[in-house]
Amino acid sequence: MKAAVFKSGQTATGAFLHIEDVDRPEPTTGYVLLRVVACGVCRTDLHIVEGDLPPIKPLLIPGHQIVGEVAGGATLALPLGTRVGVSWIGGVDGSCWFCHHAMENLCDQPTFTGYTVDGGYAEYALVREDFVFPLPSGLDDAHVAPLLCAGIIGFRSLRVAGVEPGERVGLFGFGSSASLAIAILQSWKCEVYVSTRGEDHRKRAVSLGATWVGAEDEMPPVKLDRAVTFAPSGKVVVSALSSLRKGGVVAINAIHLDQMPAFDYDSLLWGERQIRSVANMTRDDARDFLKVAHALNIRPMVTVYPLADANQALLAVKNESGLGSAVIVP
Ligand SMILES: [Zn+2]
Ligand SMILES: [Zn+2]
């Protein structure tokens, strides 16, 4: 099968991945083989190929927003041809303290799709049968793909921030994940304040109904109850923190941050303000979000790339060019 392969230590900007013929995986007990019909591109993929996250496999097929059809290892619950989604959480051990305490996102022995195991930048992918999710009907393959990480993690971020209906919520950065989260916030009757760079992103936030939109260095005009940061920048976290009321929470939606700058405890964190990271997701987050996305008819904006252009798709994410999400269609 054709696949886009990352070889650790052998990449340069613009040539992160090599398109190659590799062996198609064989289904084994507990796994299903999917024929990949679309795979979304996530900023985490860029962190992997740029070395911000340490390499786990010397040869890796990235991609963790997989839409696929069961093509092997079918079961009663997953007959041949069933369309399912696969996300970043590709498996857990089910036995560690975190798994036993409903925190499988923090599992000690996790499997991450497209990082610790091969993912979906390929014609086929082998995935755990208990880590596939039913997908909302009404969205085609390319448009459903970005829901699988950008959407689920954005939703988890709102949970981690503890957003309550009607609250004032800041979104710092307005890429794929934030543009999906805003639909949920509106359904909760929240006021949404967006700080982001890029005139296109600001216009998009306005068109999606943000209460206030400003540049990345502009502060919202009111104190916020909650904030979620989407940029991989510690400076943005401090901006978000300084916009909070007492008792407010910042949730950091980023697997990697450049650096956390020093900040003044007395004026910024005192008053029971909190900073929380958002790590991975649980299967419940995935199922709950996909139901909400269906009910709200959330439809991401996408740009489709053939597998042969996987590097261009990653560059689009790196340069934040275009709106919405890049999606690879093999
Ligand atoms: Zn575990
Ligand atoms: Zn992701």
Image (cartoon, rainbow, N blue to C red):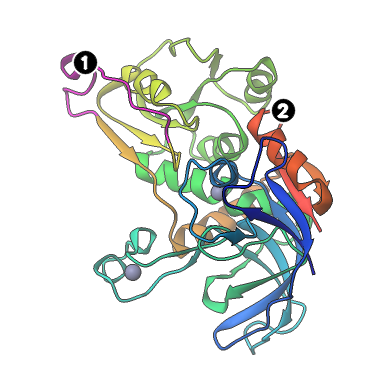
Q: Position of residue 303 (x, y in %)?
A: 79, 40
| 262 to 71, vertically: above or below | above
Q: Is residue 174 magenta?
A: no
Query: Is residue 219 at all visible to an observer of this figure?
Result: yes
Say left or right for 122 vs 205.
Answer: right
Q: At 70% from the left edge and 49% from the top edge, which residue is drawn?
A: 17
Q: At 73% from the left edge and 62% from the top edge, which residue is drawn?
A: 137
Between 23 and 40, which is closer to the camera in this rendering? 23
User: To which quarter of the image does residue 69 belong?
Assistant: bottom right
Q: At 69% from the left edge and 53% from the top edge, which residue is drawn?
A: 145
Q: Is residue 262 magenta?
A: yes
Q: Which numbered marker is on residue 264?
A: 1
Q: Where does the C terminus fall, quadrant-wise?
A: bottom right
Spatial separation of the CA atoms under disc 2 and disc 1 = 34 Å
Q: Position of residue 326 (x, y in %)?
A: 72, 42
User: To which quarter of the image does residue 43 belong?
Assistant: top right
| 265 to 67, vertically: above or below | above
Q: Where does the N terminus fall, quadrant-wise?
A: bottom right
Between 46 and 193, which is closer to the camera in this rendering? 46
Query: Is residue 324 at all visible to an observer of this figure?
Result: no
